[in-house]
Amino acid sequence: MRLPEHIPTGARIVVRCTLGVDEHDRREKYRDVVGHVLGWDGETLTVLRDESANGSRPAEVVTVEAATIVRLKPIPERPKFGGDPISRHDPIQ
């Protein structure tokens, strides 16, 4: 994949990285990172990975080497919901 020369800081992206071929099943393995760009110098992409939607994984800074990037694309921001998620769906009023 031809990578862009400039990626705007703060852009929300998904980047697919190759992890190599699995020795057991001989299939290519990938990892996806979703988050906001902190920096891009043409060699290394630094992303603030989003926390998981259910809160089981905190946000963290991830660096990705350009040679491992298979796909890169912008994605929209997550919708913002106010209040307690349980009370929004509580059928008993």
Image (cartoon, grey):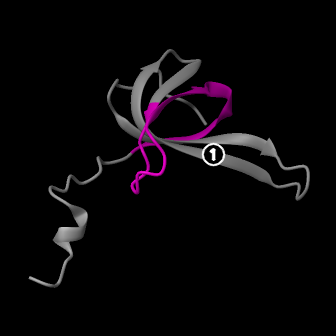
Q: Residue at x 79, y 42 (%)?
A: 20
Quick check: is 63 in the magenta stretch? yes
Q: Nearer the viewer, residue 49 or 43?
A: 49
Q: Position of residue 40 (x, y in %)?
A: 47, 20
Which quadrant holds the C terminus? Answer: bottom left
Q: Residue at x 59, y 18 (%)?
A: 43
Where 76 falls versus 84 (above or below)? Answer: above
Where 14 falls versus 39 (above or below)? Answer: below
Which quadrant holds the N terminus? Answer: top right
Q: Position of residue 52 (x, y in %)?
A: 44, 50
Q: Quadrant of residue 24?
A: bottom right
Q: Residue at x 29, y 46 (%)?
A: 77
Quick check: is 73 in the magenta stretch? yes
Q: Which residue is mark 1?
A: 31
Which residue sits furthest right? Answer: 24
Q: Amino acid at mark 1?
A: Arg
Q: Position of residue 67 (x, y in %)?
A: 68, 27
